[in-house]
Structures are given as structure tokens and as C-alpha cells.
Image (cartoon, helix red, strand yellow):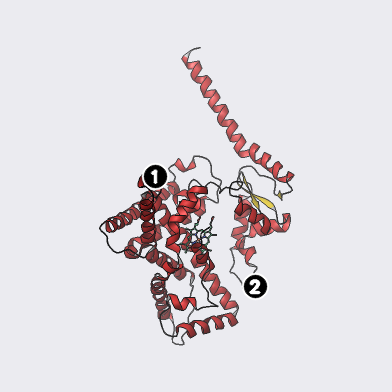
Amino acid sequence: MKISSVAVFFAFITLLIFTWRLLNWVWLRPKKLERSLRKQGLTGNSYRLLHGDFREISRMNNEANSGPISFSDDTVQRVLPFFYHSIQKYGKNSFTWLGPKPVVNIMEPELIRDVLLKHNAFPKPPPHPLGKLLATGVVALEGEQWTKRRKIINPAFHLEKLKHMVSAFQLSCSDMVNKWEKKLSLDGSCELDIWPYLQILTGDVISRTAFGSSYEEGRRIFQLQKEQAHLVAQVTQLVYVPGWRFFPTKTNRRMRQIRNEVNALLKGIIEKREKAMKVGETANHDLLGLLMESNYREMQENDERKNVGMGIKDVIEECKLFYFAGQETTSVLLLWTMVLLSKHSNWQDRAREEVLRVFGNKKPDGDGLNHLKIVSINPIYIQYSNPS
Ligand code: HEM
């Protein structure tokens, strides 16, 4: 056979394999999975080529978000309209097509318990190839790797350690309330959209509590990560074509640029801390300081060569995760707390009475916070301080 015919033959085989894989990805595999899900008694929309339910999800989200929220609205219909309608139509156990990938929705506590406990049968789904640029860290790990990493991270979230951060919380809150006070008109009232303020508040709190002494760099990281989260939210609503992340599109380039800048900023902060730790400077009580101390201890206790602790790349990823995990979650929680307190003014009165009784005109402190019953500590922190 001539060389040119060998080349044509291989090109033909490659094309055949590529076509087969494409067909399998967009049609054969989803249809096979659909048959298998239906056999198990699950119901949902029939698979639609490539997009699955994405178009309907996006249309329903846009419709639901087009008007203002009213107090009488059902929150679920507004926040997750597609899933709400899916449950009405298909019941509590159903499936949804995120592109060619089916996602099983379950609502029965027993089933949810099974999924959370049977780690081997239900491993974490692989992260979105572009989503990884936002943060990975402990949340993406499994099994022994997760246990080891959690052991290092846990001391940073002990309730005792969190008490040192109360003054940082207080500082950011009074900054925000001062700004609000300046907006008041003569009758002592004003109309204000508090959402942007709450986002800045939690961004500030995480910058102070995670990077204390490097607060300014922390704020820059916060802005960049916020933009990255926005881009990730955009790309994850579209079908991901394998290999797409390598294309130099505007979004892909910006996402890499942000990743590189955030990594460089964090590397700088971490290296500065490492130097300070080596010359025996006093420990920092911020999350990064606690994380690095715990990592150092872990490496000392075990043999450094055994690769037990985290390298600089791992520390960078954990810092990025702190931002992602701690900012939007808390600002949304605060906003909804305020919405609900406005809706239920009797609880608002009780909460205000309690705060004034415990603190009066004093600045809030850790001990006082422990005495609050109505405005109580987020149980999530208790969960963090009791690792399994
Ligand atoms: C209202 C506030 C918060 C809510 C509702 C919340 C919710 C959650 C949830 C549901 C997970 C599990 C995610 C999964 O496994 O897929 C998680 C994990 C995590 N969160 Fe939060 N979170 C909040 C605040 C915070 C804060 C303030 C931080 C830190 C600064 C934080 C750090 C983490 C970390 C490190 C993980 C990964 C834990 C692990 O995989 O072992 N979270 N959070």
C-alpha cells in the first residue's frame, strides 16, 4: 500500500471513530440512559437532541425573574420554576436533561440519606471543565483525600477560632450601617436597595476573616472571583462541548486571565505568610493563618516526605473555595432573613428586643453572641466544628 493510501485509511478510521463518539454523546448514550431511567420507574421529558431541557429551563427562569417578587409569591416557583413544574408534572422522583446528561431529582428524605451516605455508589460528579477555574479544593475531593484535607482545614472553623473574627464582622457591619445612616432623610427614613450592600458586606467580611492583614489584596481577589463566578454561571447554562475550553473565545480567555491573576495574588500572600512563619512571627488568627498553621503541624507530625500536607497549589485552591463558599451563601442568607423579618414583624420585634437586651449600646462580642436564642448562631458552623 502506498504511503498516501495509508494516510487516507487512517484519516478515514479517525473520522469514523470521531463520528461514532459524537453520535454516542449526542444521541445513543442519552437515549440508552433514558430507557434505563424509565425502567426504574422515573419519569421526565423525552430527551431532545443536544439541548435536552436547557432551553425550557432558561425560558422559565427568564419569565419567573421578569417581574418583582411579591410577598405572597411562592418562593420555589420563582427560584426554581422548571423544577417546580417538573415535580407537578412528573412527581417527586423524576429526571431532568442538562444537555445530553440526565440529572435525577429526588425529594424523599430516605433516598437523599442514601445518596449522602453511600459515597462509593454516588461519587461527586466531576466538576465542569470551566467551573474548575473558579475553585476546586476540599469540596471536589473524595474518600481518603477528602478526610485528610478536612483534618487540615477543620481547626480553621472551630467555634473558638471563629470568636476571634467577631471584631472583623463588626467592623464590616458598622461600615455598612454608617453608609445607610448617611442616606436617611430628615424624617429618619429612606428607600434603599440593600442587596448590593449585603454583597459588599460579605465580600468584606470574607476578605478580612480569610486574609486579615492582606485585606486590600483580599478585596481585589474578591472582585475577580465575583466576575469569575458570573462567567461560570453563564457557561454552565450552555451545553458543554468537550474540548471547548481550549478555544480562545472572549469568555475562555477572560476566565483564564482571572484564574492567573487570582492565583498570582494568592501565591504572593501565601509566600509572605510562609516567610513570616519561618522567622517565628506571631500567628495570624485569620482563615489563611489557621489553615497554614494546621498544615505545618500536619507535616511536622508526619514525615514531610510522606506528602501528607498541602502544597502551595492546594492552599491557593482552598482560599478560592473560602471566597466562593462563604460570600454569596451568606449574603443571600442575610437578605432572606431580612425579607422574612419584614414579613413577620412580630419576630422582627423579638429579635430587636433580644439584641438590645444582650448588647445594649456595646459592640457585639463572641460571648454575647452565645447568649442569643432568637438570633442564633448558624448551625453550619457547629457542623464544621464536629467533623465526622
Ligand atoms: C449561609 C451560609 C452557608 C451555606 C448555606 C453553606 C452551604 C454549604 C453546602 C450546602 C455545602 C456542601 C457542598 C457540597 O458538598 O457540594 C458547603 C460546603 C462548604 N462550605 Fe459552606 N455554606 C455557607 C457558608 C460558608 C462559609 C462562610 C464558609 C467559609 C468561609 C464555607 C465553606 C465551605 C467549605 C470549605 C465547604 C466544603 C466542605 C467539604 O467538602 O468538606 N461555607 N457549604
At label 2, counting other C-alpha atoms closer than 10 Å, the crowd grade (few under 14, some 14-19, many 20 or more) is few
Res. 107 in view: no
How far, Cα to Cα, is label 1 from label 2? Answer: 58 Å
Q: In the displayed structure, does residue 387 sit left or right of residue 263?
A: right
Which of the two residues, 329 or 213, is positioned nearer the viewer here? 213
Q: Residue at x 44, y 77 (%)?
A: 367
Helix, strand or loop under label 2: loop
Q: Residue at x 45, y 59 (%)?
A: 154
Name the spot of residue 356 as percent of width and height, x first. 48, 84
Q: Residue at x 54, y 44 (%)?
A: 240
Cβ atoms under marks 1 and 2 closer than 8 Å: no
The answer as to whether callout 1 falls within 8 Å of ligand 1 is no
Residue located farthest toward the left when viewing the structure as drawn:
279
Name the spot of residue 78 as percent of width and height, x first. 62, 64
Name the spot of residue 20 as percent of width and height, x first. 60, 31
Helix, strand or loop under label 1: helix
Which of the two residues, 143 or 178, is positioned nearer the viewer here? 143
Residue located farthest toward the bottom when viewing the structure as drawn:
187
Identify the amino acid type marked 2.
Ser
Name the spot of residue 312 as percent of width and height, x first. 36, 50
At label 1, counting other C-alpha atoms closer than 10 Å, the crowd grade (few under 14, some 14-19, many 20 or more) is few
Q: Which mark is residue 306?
A: 1
Identify the amino acid type marked 1.
Lys
Which of the two residues, 10 or 201, is positioned nearer the viewer here? 201
Q: Residue at x 65, y 68 (%)?
A: 74
Give the labeled residue for mark 2. Answer: 72
Which of the two residues, 227 or 341, is positioned nearer the viewer here? 341
